[in-house]
């Protein structure tokens, strides 16, 4: 199974099919892992791209590439969580305050905050979860698979498992056992996902506000 097919409890989102786009401010690039389906859209998720969007999605999950010390795009009304993926971590300045993110550490901040990277000397990756504050709640955390691990999703929530490092295989509803490649992502709407291997993963969860 591959592609974001509606109605499936578990969907594999292969890394080689992620769509690339430029940031809203044009100072970096990102690959879109998943975005809330809202019909025709010509931008890169929550307005992070070029062109006009007839309806802004309520959440996006993406991997950004930061190549130098640059300002991040502004997203008023959005809650952002960012995980450093590269071995050297990522330095940030958030509303004037320096923040040093070790690899796999997460920073949470208001999308309207003034944020920039600092101390970047080469291409650096980070995982971004952005949710509309009025419509959704989101969480982003690192996880470890040490032999085996089961992943479930809370009722009404969507859970994403992003394979970050190591060796990992997965199986679940409608998905035969298979080895994953770096940054392959599994979207779980219901049921249980079984993971085996020795790996680092990211767990992103999105829950509608009632």
Image: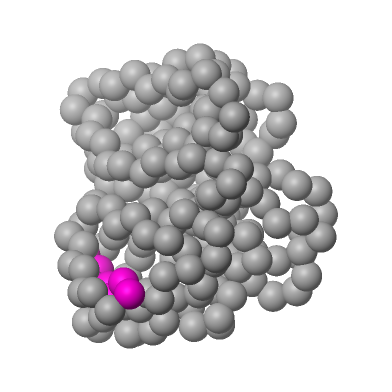
In the rendered image, which quarter is residue 124 located in? Answer: bottom left
Judging depth in this view, the residue of 45 and 75 nearest the camera is 75
Q: Residue at x 57, y 23 (%)?
A: 156
Q: Position of residue 18 (x, y in %)?
A: 57, 55
* Residue 10 visible in the displayed image: no
- Would residue 90 be counted in the magenta stretch? yes
Q: Residue at x 49, y 40 (%)?
A: 137
Q: Position of residue 54 (x, y in %)?
A: 81, 60
Q: Residue at x 82, y 54 (%)?
A: 40
Which range is magenta?
Answer: 89-95
Relative to 176, 198 lies left or right? left
Relative to 6, 147 lies left or right? left
Q: Is residue 209 above or below residue 79?
A: above
Q: Is residue 86 above or below residue 106?
A: below
Q: Indicate the quadrant containing the C terminus: top left, top right, bottom left or bottom right.
A: top right
Looking at the picture, the colour scheme in use is one colour
Judging depth in this view, the residue of 192 and 105 nearest the camera is 105
* Residue 166 visible in the displayed image: yes
- Main SS class of the magenta portion in the image: strand
Relative to 185, 56 lies left or right? right
Q: Is residue 79 above or below residue 124?
A: above
Q: Is residue 80 above or below residue 65?
A: above
Q: Residue at x 21, y 74 (%)?
A: 98
Q: Position of residue 127 (x, y in %)?
A: 39, 56
Numbered circles on residues, count: 0
Q: Indicate the quadrant containing the N terminus: top left, top right, bottom left or bottom right.
A: top right
Q: Position of residue 21 (x, y in %)?
A: 60, 69
Relative to 93, 126 lies left or right? right
């Amino acid at each position: 199974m591959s592609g974001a097919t509606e109605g499936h409890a578990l969907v594999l989102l292969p890394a080689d099919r992620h769509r690339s786009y430029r940031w809203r401010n044009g100072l970096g690039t990102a690959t879109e892992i998943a975005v809330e389906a809202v019909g025709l859209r010509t931008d890169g998720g929550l307005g992070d791209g070029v062109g006009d969007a007839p309806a802004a999605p309520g959440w996006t999950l993406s991997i950004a590439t930061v190549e130098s010390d640059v300002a991040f795009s502004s997203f008023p009304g959005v809650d952002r969580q960012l995980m450093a993926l590269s071995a050297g971590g990522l330095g940030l300045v958030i509303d004037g305050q320096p923040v040093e993110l070790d690899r796999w550490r997460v920073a949470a901040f208001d999308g309207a905050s003034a944020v920039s990277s600092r101390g970047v000397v080469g291409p650096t990756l980070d995982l971004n979860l952005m949710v509309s504050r009025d419509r959704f709640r989101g969480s982003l955390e690192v996880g470890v698979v040490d032999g085996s691990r089961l992943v479930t999703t809370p009722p009404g929530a969507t859970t994403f498992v992003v394979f970050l490092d190591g060796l990992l295989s997965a199986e679940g509803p409608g998905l035969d056992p298979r080895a994953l490649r770096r940054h392959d992502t599994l979207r779980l709407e219901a049921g249980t996902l079984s993971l085996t291997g020795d790996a680092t993963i990211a767990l992103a969860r999105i829950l509608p506000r009632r």
